[in-house]
Image: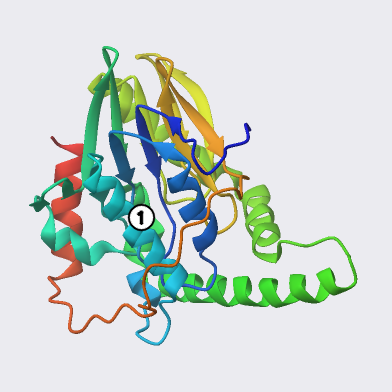
Amino acid sequence: MGKHSKSQTRRVEAVVISDTHLGTYGCKADDIVNYLQSISTPILVLNGDIIDIWQFSKSYFPKSHMKIIRQVIKMMEKGTNVVYLAGNHDEHLRRMIGLKLGNLSIENKLVLELDGKKTWIFHGDVFDVFMHHSKWLAKLGAVGYGLLTIINRFTNQFLSTFTLKKVSLSGDVKKAIKKGKNNITSKFERIVSGLAIEKGYDYAICGHIHWPDKKNISNHNGSMCYLNSGDWVENNTAIEYYDGDWHLYKHTNQQFEEPETSKNQMLVGDDYLLSNHKVLFKTMVNDIINS
């Protein structure tokens, strides 16, 4: 990864990030702001689970998380088109699908055509049978994962005082799950790639499963390139388009810092107007798969 000065940004043609989980303790807010300040792009796709409404609390939405929202607005003011694709943790936004406010639009999916190739972008929970048939259990798992990230943070603070190597408890748990149930991830990839090939897409980009990846997948009908944008809880990864291809990018740069311009420390929001989640889910399925 190249070094960037505060006066220098990388120009890329499009960017996809997902699973930032704003409003949770695990969100790497400072890293997200640093990354967004380090790039310049005409298209920014926020591919779901950006604000974690499942775990949202009016008592926890710190200033660093507000900086992310302000940075996205700054990018919009400079001409960046922002497409917010709703995920499962921010599924309530699916009642606002089709909304356009200036350079911001909210959708279920996005199809981009770049250099004559089509890219199909959506969050990915449409294929998560477990989540939609055992939603209460999925939410319980999300809360448990959030608690684990808090424990992980305090553990690493303790280890750092003795200059010991940091650990990733949540990452280790995910790796253990993946090792034992690798077929779940591969099945997810097969479903996505099979539909992408059938629909004639060259690329498919998802988030949701928090496993950054890029791979070419083929079947008897053809081939395509599958990408997953990972997350900003463990991996700090994004998908960037330049030089005629999509690239998986891992952010490690800490050079950019935003000046202090606001005293706002809390995002306060009351009384979401919610449609039945089953109706929202069926609408999303039809939008992503059948159109």
Report the residue at 64% width, 64% height from top: 170
Left or right relative to 46: residue 153: right
Question: Is the residue 187 above or below the residue 176 in the image?
Answer: above
Q: Quadrant of the C terminus?
A: top left
Q: Amino acid at mark 1?
A: Gln
Q: How many marks?
A: 1
Q: Position of residue 232 (x, y in %)?
A: 51, 54
- Residue 228 visible in the shown view: no
In which quadrant of the rendered image does the N terminus lie?
Answer: top right
Q: Is residue 181 left or right of residue 195?
A: right
Please provide percent x and percent y for residue 9: 46, 35
Dividing the picture into quarters, in which one does residue 241 lie?
top left
Front position in the image: 99 or 274:
99
SS for tag 1? helix
Residue 51 found in image quarter: bottom left
Q: Is residue 104 above or below residue 162?
A: above
What residue appears at the point 22 percent right and 31 percent down from the top-left corner?
Answer: 111
Residue 132, position as x, y percentages in the image: 32, 62
Q: Nearer the viewer, residue 233 or 134?
A: 233
The vertical placement of 144 against 59, above or below, is: above
Q: Nearer the viewer, residue 22 or 212?
A: 22
**Residue 37: x and y, percent?**
44, 47
Q: Residue at x 44, y 67 (%)?
A: 260
Q: Is residue 194 above or below residue 155?
A: above
Residue 281 seen by the camera = yes
In the picture of the structure, the residue carrying the numbered disc 1 is 71
Left or right for 246, reference 70: right
Question: Along the horizontal axis of the image, is 84 left or right of 237?
Answer: left
Residue 59 occupies which quadrant of the picture? bottom left
* Circle 1 residues within 10 Å: few <14, some 14–19, many ≥20: some
